[in-house]
Amino acid sequence: MDGDRVHCRLDELLDERGMTLTQLSALAGISVVNLSVLKNDRARAIRYSTLEAVCQALDCAPGDLLTLRV
Amino acid sequence: MSESIHPTLGRAGRVLRLVQWASIAYVLFAAVEIIGTIAAAISTVQDAADPSRGVSFDFDARYEVPQQTNAEFAGSAYVLPGSTLIFTHASGTVAGLPAGAIVTQAIAQSLLALTGGAIAACIAMLVARVLVGSPFVHAAARTLVVLAVVVMVGFEASSVLAVIARSMAGGIAYQTGSDPSSPSYDVLMSGGGSGIDIDLVPIYVGLALLGLAAVFRFGTTLQADVQRLEKDTEGLV
């Protein structure tokens, strides 16, 4: 198990809220580079602090942000 | 030898490359020296069998020269007038030496050259590891342990064999002057060889190298931990 099936729905959540990556970066205090890594499913691990900051900025639950592909 | 120097080494990398080349050159020099010593020993043993030829030999010879009390010196350091000057070591062409003494002396000299060559080889291997940017590996710690043993055993064994060679030579008779009618003329006999002096420096250096090997082993463990952490946190946001 190396996390390949975990999918980040950041793109969909940003679209729903009409928010850009840059705006999310300013709100959450996470760099655009790291958000881009998350958005493109290139992240292999995520800190709880990052997960908390993104979910708070998007007003969603961790389960809304991260899903498991079948 | 053709590996490129790790980019972070900078100028130190060029110095290390020079050390590596010098070490390899010394290994070759030591090999030539060993071959030369063995060849010389074979020739010497053959010459020793001929009582009219003799062989070049170093030995301990105690010869006392009392200094005149009314001597005057100027312009340099001088042996105190009235004291006794003692010669302790001699080098000459000696006949009648037993072959065992010559062979043992040759082994002692070869061992010294072999020790130097082994040290150079270990240094070359260690430098090669640093040049590729991974000094803290198990092989480096093992090389340092080998180097420690080589230093401790090589130098001490060479000293011991040299003393044994002089002891096997037995007493060597020599004249204290060329004019038998001179009052200072005498025929003396050198001792059969002095006791063995253990030089503590190679032992201490060997122990220090063992300590360094322990440091490298610790460094290897730390480096493995860092690499594991890097692997675990690769792609961490």
Image (cartoon, coloured by chain):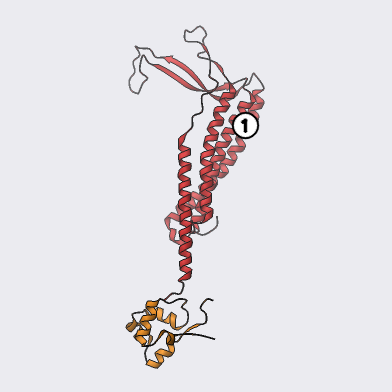
Chain colours: A orange, B red
Q: Secondary structure at mark 1?
A: helix
Q: Is residue B198 above or below residue B28?
A: above
Q: In this orientation, which residue lies closer to the viewer: B60 or A49?
A: A49
Q: Is residue A25 above or below residue B80?
A: below
Q: Chain of mark 1?
A: B
> Could you tell me which residue is drawn at 53 percent across and 32 percent down?
B159
Numbered circles on residues, count = 1
- Quarter of the image where the N terminus of chain A is located: bottom right
Q: Position of residue B27 (x, y in %)?
A: 56, 44
Q: Position of residue B23 (x, y in %)?
A: 52, 47
* Observer able to see residue A32: no
Q: In this orientation, which residue lies closer to the viewer: B90 or B198?
A: B198
* Observer able to see residue B227: yes
Q: Position of residue B187 (x, y in %)?
A: 53, 12
**Side of A56 where B16 appears, left or right:** right
Q: In this orientation, which residue lies closer to the viewer: B14 or A53?
A: A53
Q: In this orientation, which residue lies closer to the viewer: A21 or A6?
A: A6
Q: Residues within 10 Å of mark 1 (few under 14, many from 20)?
A: few
Residue hosting label 1: B40
The kind of residue tagged 1 is Ala
**Side of A38 where B43 appears, left or right:** right
- Quarter of the image where the C terminus of chain A is located: bottom right
> Could you tell me which residue is drawn at 37 percent across and 81 percent down?
A52
> Could you tell me which residue is drawn at 61 percent across and 26 percent down?
B101
Q: Position of residue B86 (x, y in %)?
A: 44, 19
